[in-house]
Image (cartoon, grey):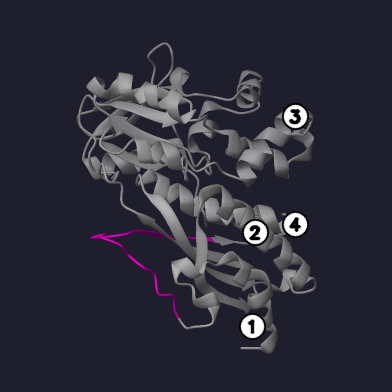
Amino acid sequence: MEIKEFSRIKKFFRPLTSKRMGAMELLDDAALVPIKKMDSIVVSTDALVEEIHFHSDERADFVSRKALRTNLSDLAAMGSKPFAYNLALIIGKKKLINIDQWLKLFSKGLAVDQKKFGIRLIGGDTVTSLGPTSICISIFGTPNPKGSLLRCGAMVGDGIFVSGTIGDAALGLRLRGNRSLSCLSKENSYCISRYRIPRPRIELGLALGGMASAAMDISDGLFQDLSHLCGASNVGASVQANKIPLSKEVSTFVNENKFSIEHVITGGDDYELIFTAPVSKEKSIFNLARVTKTRITRIGTVQSGRGIFIFDKRGNIIPVSKGGYSHD
């Protein structure tokens, strides 16, 4: 380990830590995390790799915020409140030329979201590589006192709900990489921003404890992730395509046949919540939308059997040729 690595950790990452969290100013081999009256903690890990999950020319603060927020979304899906995270950063050859400048902006992005979500860095590692830049974050949260959200509790007859709007990030990714489609600047900037910086639904996840029967976040597309949830619960689902909430921007492209409903439901990086709940909870669910200031839409119903069926407004099944987004 080079002296420069220690100095960079001190300069860019030590300010992100907290003595209260047991990070030991990143001077020790591990953190000592105080756990008060908890039988368990919620832990998740996600990795982002250059040119797979983010473009090489992406701003460093956008990259760091997306890396942190994708992990936060996993905790939101569990109904957990985050409190700390570890960061393993492999800095690739394309970033080595201006490494200090890149790290300054990268750490600034983390600082912004640490403040927003009330979490602190407690440890990790930083190395350089001749390969691509990779970011691996492990995040820690407290269990929901009203009950953790799991994928395996959906029951036949439950409603299927989603937060926010679906398909924005998938369209944003396409727009960012296809300049011939980039003709509507406001629409482009909105969808591209949704791709760059997800909105983890922490507050909604916490509120759904004891109310939702099953939940997960949508990272690989609505169709694929609903399939995972139903598979874990041994049920099937029917979804009304015209009920899937779309932003004005996505609706414009769908109506002009520049973006299909299949793209909407199989595109990745939405990082919205998809969850099920008994019909008796539906009124309370929509009250949560008001309290948390989050759009919530019922899009379908849990059914017996297996399989996910998407219906158009005439009742015909919409064929889905691919399952969802793959991070390969």
Residue 319 visible in the displayed image: no
The answer to whether mark 2 and mark 4 are in CB contact below 8 A is no
Foreground residue, 319 or 260? 260
Numbered label tally: 4
Of the residues under marks 2 and 1, which one precedes in the sequence? 1
Q: Is residue 50 left or right of residue 118?
A: right
Q: Position of residue 35 (x, y in %)?
A: 32, 65
The single residue placed furthest to the front in the displayed view is: 20
Q: Which amino acid does label 1 sit on?
A: Phe
Q: What element carries label 4?
A: loop
Q: Crowdedness of circle 2 by 10 Å Cα count: few (<14), some, many (20+)?
A: few
Q: Is mark 2 on a helix, strand or loop?
A: loop
Of the residues under marks 2 and 4, which one precedes in the sequence? 2
Tell me how far mark 2 sits from mark 1, CA to CA: 28 Å
Q: Which dot marks residue 57? A: 4
Name the quadrant of the N terminus.
bottom right
Tell me how far mark 2 sits from mark 4, CA to CA: 9 Å
Residue at image mark 2? 51
The answer to whether mark 3 and mark 2 are in CB contact below 8 A is no
Q: Position of residue 51 (x, y in %)?
A: 64, 59
Q: What stretch is highlighted in magenta?
A: 30-47
